Image: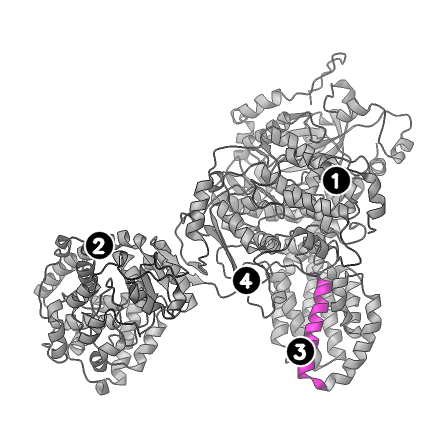
Amino acid sequence: MPPEQVQKQEHDEEASDGYEETSDDTGIEKKQDREREVQCKARVSYARNQFDNDTNDTWEDPECLSEDQYSDESDGTVEDMCPEVQEEIEQFAKSFRKLDLHYKVVGKTGEGTFSSVYKAIDLRYDKYVNDWDLEERTAEYHSPRSKRQRLNHPKEKRVKYVAIKKIYVTSSPQRIHNELELLKDLSGSKNVVSLITAFRHLDQVIAVMPYFRHVDFRDYFRKLDIPEIQLYMRSLFTALKFVHAKGILHRDIKPTNFLYDCGKGRGVLVDFGLAERESDDGTCCCTSQTNSIRRESKTQGSAIGGYPKNDQRPSKRANRAGTRGFRAPEVLFKCNAQTTKIDIWSAGVILLTFLSKRFPFFNSPDDIDAVVEMATVFGRARMRSCALLHGATFETAIPTITEKGHSLARIVEWATARNKDNPLTSQEKAALQFLEATLELDHRKRLSAEQALQHSFLTNIDPDVSEDEVETI
Amino acid sequence: MLSLPVSPVPPPPMSRRVPLSNIQNHSQPHINLSTAIPAKRPAKPSRDALGPPPSKKAHLDDAFTAVDQKENRLVTPSKLRLVPKTPNRNDTAASSQSRRDAVAPPSRIARAKAPVATRRNDKLDVRARERRPGQQPSQKAVTLKERQMQQAAVAENNEAIRQWQRHYFRVFPTLTFFMDDSIPDDKKAGLRLRLADLNSTVLDKWSTNKVTHVLTTRDDVPPEFPKELANATINPKLLGVGAKPDFRDSGLPKLNVYDDHKDVLVLARLTNKKIWSVEKVDRMINTLHEKIEDDIPSPEKRLPSKLKRFDAAIPPVSKYTAEDYKRDEAILERLLREDKHHGAQSSTKEMYTFKGPYLMVGDASGRYKPFIIREYQNAKVPEDGDWPQFRSNREGRCPFVLDPDTKRAYMREEAEKEAEAKAKLKEKEKEKEKEAARVKTKTSMEPPPRNQSLKAKTSSLKEELAKSAVDRKPLSCIENKVDRDLATAAAATAIKKTEGHLDKLREIQRARQNHLVVTGYEPVASGLQAAGPTSAVFSQAISSNTAVAGPKAGTSRDVQRLNRRVFEKTTVGIRQTNTAASLNVAAEEEVMVEVKTERKSLKRNRSQITKKEVKKQPQAGYCENCRDKYDDFEEHIGSKRHLRFASNNDNFIELDALLASLRRPRKESSPSYDYDEY
């Protein structure tokens, strides 16, 4: 099929894998190297979304606090590809012996530090048992394909697309193993991406996953009405519940990793490159209440206003893998006993994005500014107690950070320029109530995915009411 | 005895020390010198310009005496006796020194400067004072024998200091401090940290039950007991006796309300809290952290004999000539240098005190260093601050990122305010503008209501200028930095043409704000965060470009890539230009020239990059498998080393096992071709 046709058929985009990550067990030098790498990559990467590429997996290292990678929007379609990319695809197709007999690479959809993702046609789909193809199994001939596609191929069998993830050869086998193993464990949910197969030639590992049609987040995040948001969130929390039930933290929940098809109201969680299993190994005083209380009494309220110039003490380290703007407070406060609740926070940030109609909501060029932004919203008092929960002191003299912060409702009002004539709707208020429960600084009080699914916001979805109340954008 | 570091008596105020002080040279030069010393060291205006400073030993003795007398329950007498009284002929001088010490505690420098440690004899104190100057036999160069003696004394002395340190490392964690209002805030902060470092507790609120020590910088410390006051004696023994009552079993009524006694020092006295001067605490902490080395000070480190002679016979103030001062200053300078060099350890205790808005997140357990430290620039109004804060900008945009459009409007408003005050000449012109602005407001770009107020005030002329830039979108999109700067430059030039003085102000604003955008996310003064310009800049670029109304950017990857590259490359240039612009406001011409050259250079940059982009760019990175960084990805993965890893199946055993389980299952009906299974 010529590229043009493909382009016509698929106006939407492909699963992105545009993340970068950094090893969590490497030395400082290595991390610096990676930072360099990241910066270099940023220049040439084509990840789909501007905001989806800055995943980090670094243990604390001041030198690379803000190694986030940014790259620009580009459609994952063949038409857009510059010759360079086309050449790359050709090279890739040739790089694997007889790969082209199985898959026809038609486009590149994402590039990160550790992998590139290509869109390909699954040429030999029919030869295999395709348990992964839930769509096929459940919806048989109730094809949700676009009209245009059906017109172009009225008689042909549906073309099956897959996403081929080429993991760079510079990634360690352990890292690759981790991701593939988690993916394997995570099969069986229609909201979580599954793994079709994976193979290796020398150091090159390729993972084949289903391709999901979806719409770019920025195309719809301001247009969804509350019931649609409810559907989105329910889909997302369903995925999270599934992942969390397996004891896995995704660590990188963000719109670009949740491929949502607005038409179908279904989303798929992808990219488990940063995911890890929940472990009890780490210790943090947030796990034992007495500890934190004792600390609290000792450290409260004594602002120091300075720091030792040549502090010889070691740096506190904690896994901070994730994406800027979506990191939970406990990640920023270097908690060493992070739980699945960090994903809930990130999901909350997505909801906040919907409600405030701001994307990204948190800019967070680095973790420090991230804390400032968070504190701007939540206020000093709450940040202080959250920090203390994780054995950290919080001290600031930034005038725009108030003691009590703002309510999320106030923030949403402000962000969407509300006034008396244009108050929050009852639906929005219900959404805000749910938002408060997901963007709870104290992860112990934050909803779990399971609880969230039982929350009235996700159980009572009433699309009919929305018509009247939804505001025009 | 005047100097009782641990005594409940505050360091005797200057008033008591009048006679001595008079003898000392309170020469201005020395005040200057001491102020040159980092704040951490207590300034000692009255310090040993002339007299040899008290030795470490003397200082130690003070402490010991105190321990001995006040807290002998904590230190056994035997330990104290470790330092034998070795009277030498410096005795009297030393004792007087130590008393001076009480007035002005010795710094490291002072101590380093001191001749070999001498032993103070408490009992000689008063007499020694009476005998004061001129009674010392003049000293000649130190003989070998003397040196040996001194060496022995130093060793003993050092041991004593170590004892003292051990003791106080144990004592400090039991102490609870309260700082009175006389201490400047920055000093308080520093002390707080240093005390916390010693595991002492520092309370912000007075608590009669908890506080054990009150810190002050005041001179008018209330006397401890009326009896002492009447006696006006300085006999340490007496003081010791007087101080004996333990605050813990004090029979005095408990005072819980600070307000009852406006003076916290009085209150402290009433409740038998110890009152320490800040200097004393500083000195104690410094001594605690001091590394004691057994080697005798090298000859160079010692004072020149000339100075000693000078010390021995302290000349009257009048005879302290400029020449003397010069010489002393040179010595002090040298010692300062040495101190700096030698005192690397002690400098770890040096504090950086925030001067602007800051955020600090540290580890409450104290095991780790603070992991978030950032200081932002001071801003007259919060909106000017470079830290993340809510900004008024268009719907869809990140609320923490300054929208260039909104910002421009804001800047204009600011500039107008300034101009209004400064240049009333332009009033007429302004009237016109405002009128036009009212018309213009309606046509301004869909801002949320909040922004309207800002925009409404903008003048038509400037709106036009901004528009010329904004219209093409790049201005609002930092990513297209070239265009943006060209636009800014164009705007600047146009402004110059049309308006005069008024716009210089605006230009400053603009330059300043621009600068802010570029540097906004670079770490300020924290010294810890080395965020690369790439990430900082990118974040700005992205967020300012995100979610703007309208279709997604339809530009091809190449174009976008170009923009990115250009942006990166020009970051420095932009900053320089802006700085230049702000510096050159007075010289209008210069600014314009600057702007033009900037434009040229940007153009050049762009064309260069266009050519460059055609070639495939080597990607640098890090290979987890080779544990090595590379400059060129392609080159690296073809390298022998990497291929060796790649071709060694042993490296992939675990992964292969997993992959084996991930084989794509064939349909049974499907014949097995000779294809490899993928």
Question: Between disc 3 and disc 2, whose residue precedes?
Answer: 2
Residue B291 lies, with reference to residue A52, above or below; the image says below
Q: Which mark is residue B418?
A: 3
Determine the secondary structure under disc 1: helix
For image coordinates 18% across by 80% down, the residue present is B314
Q: Are marks 2 and 1 on the same chain?
A: no
- The CA distance from mark 2 to mark 1 is 69 Å
- Label 3 chain ID: B
- The verdict on a common chain for dots 3 and 1 is no
Q: Secondary structure at mark 3?
A: helix
Give the residue type that dot 3 points to. Answer: Glu
Q: CA distance from mark 3 to mark 1?
A: 50 Å
Is any part of residue A70 visible from this angle? Answer: yes
User: Marks 3 and 2, how far apart in space?
Assistant: 62 Å
- Does the magenta run of residues contain A411? no
Query: In the figure, is residue B464 to the left or right of B643?
Result: right
Q: Which residues are magenta?
A: B402-424
Q: Amino acid at mark 2?
A: Arg
Q: Which residue is mark 1?
A: A230
Crowd band around label 3 with a 10 angstrom C-alpha radius: few (<14), some (14–19), many (20+): some
Above or below, comparing residue A118 to residue A34 in the picture:
above
Co-location on one chain, circles 4 and 1: no
Q: CA distance from mark 4 to mark 1?
A: 39 Å
Between disc 4 and disc 2, whose residue precedes?
A: 2
Question: Which of the chains bears the disc numbered 1?
Answer: A
Q: Amino acid at mark 4?
A: Tyr
Q: Which residue is mark 4?
A: B376
Please, what is the dominant secondary structure of the magenta stretch? Answer: helix
Q: Chain of mark 4?
A: B
